[in-house]
Image: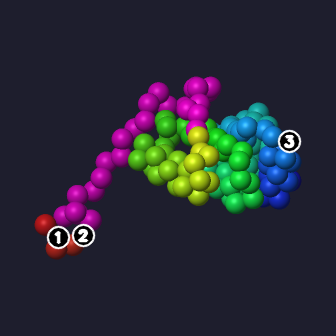
Amino acid sequence: MLNINYYKEKVIRMEEAKFDTIFLADVSHIGRGMIPHYLSVFEGMTILSALSMVTKHIGLMATIATSYANPFTVACRLMSLDKISNGRAGYVEPVRSCSLQPDAFIKIRFISDEKRIPGSG
């Protein structure tokens, strides 16, 4: 079973071996025939933030599927990891690999203040 200690032990060994970067491929969909390992993984930026606390030099990169994530949220997640890790964050935009993935990011429709907050306006 993959847990935080598994990743922690691996990244410490990688840093001791002078690896430049750890890269985690995120999974943006789950379907039949998926490798069971994908069903129990952490979200990339979350695990990398935790790993930044036990490393000093290794670069920390993950995929972030901007087809599914709001661009502002992606920027905040990346900026947070970069600050937590003292400048070691990076990301890769995954190439569309499945017909289940959408063609483009769908913009969020915000609720107006009048509808969200009674009596505002």
Q: Which residue is mark 1?
A: 120
The part of the image, by quadrant, that contains residue 118 is bottom left
Q: Which residue is mark 2?
A: 117
User: For this rendering, which residue is in front, 6 or 103?
Assistant: 6
Determine crowd level at label 3: few under 14, some 14-19, many 20+ residues with C-alpha closer than 10 A: few
Determine crowd level at label 1: few under 14, some 14-19, many 20+ residues with C-alpha closer than 10 A: few
Asked if residue 113 can be seen in this view, the reply is yes
User: For this rendering, which residue is in front, 32 or 64?
Assistant: 64
Question: Three-letter amino acid code at disc 1?
Answer: Ser
Q: Which residue is mark 3?
A: 17
> Does the residue at mark 1 contact the one at mark 2 (Cβ under 8 Å)?
yes
> Does the residue at mark 2 contact the one at mark 3 (Cβ under 8 Å)?
no
User: For this rendering, which residue is in front, 12 or 46?
Assistant: 12
Kindly report the secondary structure that dominates the magenta region of the rendered protein.
loop
Question: Three-letter amino acid code at disc 2?
Answer: Ile
Asked if residue 82 lies in the magenta stretch, the reply is: no
- Compared across the picture, whether 44 is left or right of 34 comes to left
User: In the rendered image of this protein, does residue 67 appear above or below residue 82?
Assistant: above
The part of the image, by quadrant, that contains residue 58 is top right
Q: Earlier in the sequence, mark 1 or mark 3?
A: 3
Asked if residue 46 can be seen in this view, the reply is no
| SS category of the residue bearing label 3 | loop
- Compared across the picture, whether 48 is left or right of 64 comes to right
For the magenta stretch, what is the residue range?
A: 91-117
Q: Earlier in the sequence, mark 2 or mark 3?
A: 3
User: How far across and how far down the image is residue 11, in percent?
Assistant: 80, 48
